[in-house]
C-alpha cells in the first residue's frame, strides 16, 4: 500500500498549527514528521490534527526549544528515541508503521555560527551528534527504515546557492559534509530526494534575513529523506513544497515529500 511522507521543520507547532493543518488538508501526506516543535508533548495541539485523520502520534518535546513529532494516518507505535551526544535535547523520535517500516525523525543541532569546535561549543556538539548517529547505525544496521528531518547540512554543491561562498559557513563546511557522509554510509542510507531529482539546484530552507527570499533565492537543502537499500527502489515522486515558505507567518523551511510503494 503506497504512502506519502513529508518532513518539515515547523519552527513552533503551536504557533503554526494552522499551517500544519493547511499542509495536511491540501497535500494529504499519510505521515508528517515535524522538527523544532518548540513544545512539550502535552501542549502539542493533537486534537486539531486528529480531526484531520492523523490519529497516531509519537513525539519528544521541550518547552520553547527543539522537539520532534511524527503524525500518521497509518497505525504507528513508538520505536525509540535517542539522545546522541548526551545533550538532553528532544532531537530524535522513531515510529514503526503497521507495514513494518520504521521512521526515524531527526533534528540535528544547527552548530552555531563559527565552524570551529575549539571556540564554538555548539559546532562540536553538532559533530559529536553526527558521530554518535554514525556509530549507532554502524552497530545496528537498519532495515526497512526511513530517516528524515532537518539534518542542518547541505551536502552537495547544488544543495546551496553558492558553493564557494558557503564553504566556510556552518551547514556546508567540508568537515560537516564528511561527518554527514559517514553517517549516511554507516546505515547504507540512500538519499531519496536526490535519487529522484539527481541534478540541479535544490533548496528546502531560505533565511528569514532576506528581504525578498523568493527573489534572492539564496537557499540551502537542509531537510532530507533517506531510506535503507531494501526499500529505496520503492520511493518516488520526491519534491520540495516551496510554496509553503511563502505562506503567512511561515517557517523558514519548506516541507519535503516522497512517496513509497510498500
Image (spheres, rainbow, N blue to C red):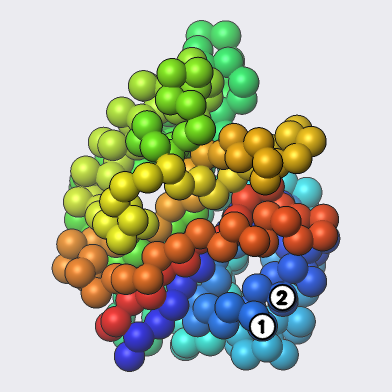
- Please, what secondary structure does the residue beneath circle 1 have? helix
Compared to residue 49, the image places residue 44 above or below, namely above
Apparent side of residue 202 relative to residue 137 in the rendered image (left or right) = right
**What residue is pinned by disc 2?**
22
Question: Do the CB atoms of the residues marked 2 and 1 lie less than 8 Å apart?
Answer: yes
- In x, y percent, where is residue 79? 41, 69
From this view, report whether residue 163 is shown above or below residue 246.
above
Quarter residue 217 falls in: top right
Report the quarter where the C terminus lies: bottom left
Residue 234: mark in rendering: none
Q: Is residue 49 visible?
A: yes
The answer to which quarter of the image holds residue 20 is bottom right
Q: Residues within 10 Å of mark 2 (few under 14, many from 20)?
A: some
Q: Reply above or below: 223 against 112.
A: below
Identify the residue at image location x=51%, y=9%: 118
Q: Nearer the viewer, residue 225 or 197?
A: 197
Picture coordinates of residue 133 (x, y %)? Answer: 36, 43
Along the line of sight, which residue is nearer the eye, 12 or 19? 19
CA distance separating discs 2 and 1: 5 Å
Query: Circle 1 is placed at which residue position?
Result: 25
Picture coordinates of residue 109, whole percent (x, y) = 55, 37
Q: Is residue 84 visible in this depiction of the protein?
A: no
Q: Quadrant of residue 228?
A: bottom left
Q: Quadrant of the N terminus?
A: bottom left
Where is residue 247? Give x, y as percent.
76, 61
Mark 1 nearby-residue class (10 Å; few <14, some 14–19, many ≥20): few
In the picture, measured across the screen, residue 14 lies left or right of residue 217, that is: right
Amino acid at each position: 500500500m503506497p504512502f506519502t511522507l513529508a518532513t518539515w521543520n515547523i519552527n513552533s507547532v503551536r504557533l503554526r498549527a494552522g499551517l500544519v493543518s493547511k499542509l495536511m488538508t491540501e497535500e494529504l501526506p499519510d505521515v508528517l514528521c515535524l522538527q523544532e516543535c518548540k513544545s512539550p508533548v502535552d501542549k502539542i495541539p493533537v486534537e486539531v490534527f486528529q480531526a484531520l485523520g492523523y490519529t497516531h502520534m509519537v513525539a519528544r518535546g521541550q518547552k520553547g526549544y527543539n522537539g520532534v513529532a511524527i503524525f500518521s494516518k497509518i497505525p504507528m507505535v513508538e520505536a525509540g528515541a535517542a539522545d546522541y551526544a548526551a545533550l538532553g535535547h528532544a532531537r530524535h523520535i522513531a515510529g514503526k508503521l503497521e507495514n513494518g517500516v520504521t521512521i526515524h525523525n531527526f533534528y540535528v543541532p544547527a552548530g552555531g555560527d563559527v565552524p570551529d569546535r575549539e571556540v564554538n561549543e555548539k559546532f562540536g556538539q553538532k559533530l559529536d551528534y553526527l558521530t554518535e548517529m554514525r556509530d549507532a547505525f554502524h552497530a545496528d544496521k537498519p532495515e526497512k527504515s526511513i530517516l528524515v528531518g532537518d539534518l542542518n547540512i547541505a551536502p552537495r554543491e547544488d544543495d546551496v546557492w553558492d558553493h564557494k561562498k558557503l564553504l566556510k559557513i556552518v551547514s556546508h563546511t567540508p568537515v560537516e559534509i564528511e561527518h554527514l557522509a559517514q553517517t549516511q554510509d554507516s546505515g547504507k542510507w540512500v538519499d531519496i530526494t536526490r535519487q529522484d531529482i539527481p541534478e540541479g539546484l535544490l533548496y528546502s530552507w531560505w533565511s528569514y534575513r532576506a528581504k525578498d527570499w523568493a527573489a534572492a533565492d539564496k537557499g540551502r537543502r537542509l531537510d532530507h529523506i533517506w531510506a535503507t537499500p531494501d526499500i529505496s527502489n520503492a520511493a518516488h515522486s520526491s519534491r520540495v513544497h516551496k510554496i509553503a515558505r511563502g505562506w503567512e507567518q511561515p517557517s523558514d523551511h519548506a516541507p519535503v515529500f516522497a512517496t513509497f510503494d510498500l
